[in-house]
């Protein structure tokens, strides 16, 4: 005699999926390995698992900051490319004073960008 089932959770609908013999064997092995009684339970858990989705609403200030960071990071990239081009065109591969000044500015800008992002990351966590 089968055990009585709760009518609220009676499963009446089905979905049919075709697998090769090898795919079915691999699924059965995985099902057994993970401790599920049957493939139905295995699939139900894997497909219906609820994943937590975190919705983050951002302020107009944050949007402005991100646009500014994007612009500044692009400028930094351009400056680094200019320094790299200068280094690659010189025979002795030495940095000029102007190159060093540019790299110092780039480093300072990167620190500002990181600091701004870090402030907002702390708020999100």
Image: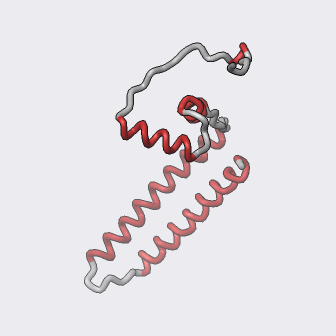
Kindly give the residue lying farthest to the bottom in the view shown. Answer: 92
For residue 10, above or below residue 125: above
Figure coloring: secondary structure
**107 left or right, relative to 90:** right
- Asked where in the image residue 46 lies, by quadrant, the reply is top right
Counting from the top left corner in percent of width and height, residue 38 is at: 57, 33
- Using residue 55 as the reference point, say whether residue 69 is left or right of it: left
Vertical relation: 123 (above or below) 75: above
Question: Which one is in front, 124 or 80?
Answer: 124
> In percent of the image, x 55 and y 63: which residue is there?
110
Q: Please provide percent x and percent y for residue 114.
A: 60, 60
x and y percentages locating residue 1 in the rendered image: 69, 19
Q: Name the residue at the front extreme.
A: 1
Q: How many marks?
A: 0
Query: Could you tell me which residue is drawn at 71 percent across and 18 percent down?
Result: 5
Q: Indicate the position of residue 43 as horizontal and vertical percent values.
A: 54, 32
- Residue 25 falls in which quadrant of the image? top left
Residue at image position (56%, 47%) is 33
Q: Please state which of residues 123 and 45 is positioned toward the viewer in this rendering.
A: 45
């Amino acid at each position: 005699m089968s055990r009585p089932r709760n009518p609220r959770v009676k499963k009446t609908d089905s979905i049919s999926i075709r697998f090769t013999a090898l795919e079915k064997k691999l699924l059965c092995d995985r099902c057994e390995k993970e401790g599920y009684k049957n493939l139905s339970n295995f699939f139900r858990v894997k497909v219906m698992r609820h994943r937590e989705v975190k919705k983050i609403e951002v302020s107009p200030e944050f949007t402005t900051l991100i646009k500014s960071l994007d612009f500044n990071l692009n400028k930094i990239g351009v400056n680094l490319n200019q320094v790299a081009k200068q280094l690659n065109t010189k025979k002795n591969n030495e940095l000029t004073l102007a190159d060093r000044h540019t790299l110092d500015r780039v480093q300072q800008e990167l620190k500002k960008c990181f600091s701004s992002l870090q402030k907002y990351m702390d708020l999100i966590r």
